[in-house]
Amino acid sequence: MSDIVLHNYYRSSTSYRVRIALEMKGLTYRYVPHHLRHGEHLEPAYLSVNPQGLVPALILGDGTLLTQSLAIIEFLDETKPAPPLLPKEALGRAHVRMLAQMIACDIHPVNNLRVLTSLRTLFGAGDEDVVNWFRHWVNEGFQPLEKILASSSETRIFCHGDTPGLADICLVAQVTSNARFGVDMTPYPTIARIHAACMALPAFQKAAPENQIDAE
């Protein structure tokens, strides 16, 4: 693959997921930022690229559009298999997808920027209300995730085994978002340990929000 373009925003957790995967795969790409808080993702120029008006969006060399971070990451994993982001065996793949989707499908959708903005504009929520909402849904998801990770024989250095994969990518991106909202990680020692192990790796460091060209 060559001439990859990634439309993203430095603080978007879904964008962070894709950046980690690209770095882990050793793929070069052109970084195109869209400031979500300034509404740049809703401008006609970007909507002509991605009609959904969300980030991330990955454009391949032939112009093919891919959106949705999990779909993008699995595409990258299938087209550049090394290093693998999913186990070889079917049960292992299901386990990793389960962990990833507990974050990507149950926590993130109710806590993304457009939902938090709607809480303010549609229901008059204040800053404290929004923070409490965010923390509530993180805790609702992290409590069972912590129990599963702490009790599973598959959990070792990372979520599944001794190499990072799809579940770790989602975990790290979520923990990074949690920090902005002051989520107490004390009840989640296994999640915190895995996060620390991931953040010791160059791919996770290079993809981190604070290291992007549009970081503020």
Image (cartoon, rainbow, N blue to C red):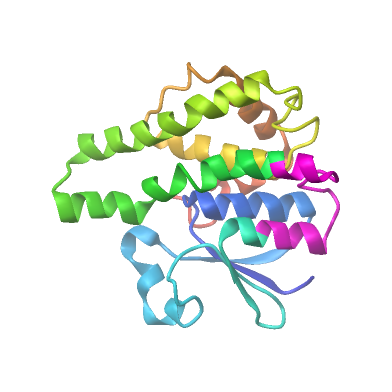
Which range of residues does the magenta coloring cover? 73-94
User: Seen from this angle, which residue lies furthest front?
Assistant: 91
Residue 5 place in picture, x, y as percent: 63, 71
Quadrant of the image containing the N terminus: bottom right
> In front: 68, or 216?
68
Q: Residue furthest left?
A: 124
Res 198 visible? yes
- What residue is rendered at 70% in x and 23% in y? 152
Is residue 103 found inside the magenta-colored segment of the image?
no
In the image: residue 165, left or right of residue 148: right
- Front residue of 203/138: it is 138
Residue 54 lies in what quarter of the image? bottom left
Can residue 181 be seen here? The reply is no
Q: Position of residue 139 (x, y in %)?
A: 42, 29
User: For residue 205, what is the image quadrant?
Assistant: top right
Q: Percent x, y for residue 159? A: 69, 32
Q: Residue at x 52, y 27 (%)?
A: 144
Q: How many marks?
A: 0
Left or right: 29, with 11 as reference point: right
Residue 84 is left or right of residue 75, and the answer is right
Q: Which residue is nearer to you in this view: 58 or 108?
A: 108
Query: What residue is rendered at 60% in x and 50% in y?
Result: 17
Identify the image quadrant of residue 151: top right
Q: Is residue 75 magenta?
A: yes
Residue 6 picture location, percent across and down: 60, 66
Residue at x 84%, y 48% (from the top left corner)? 83
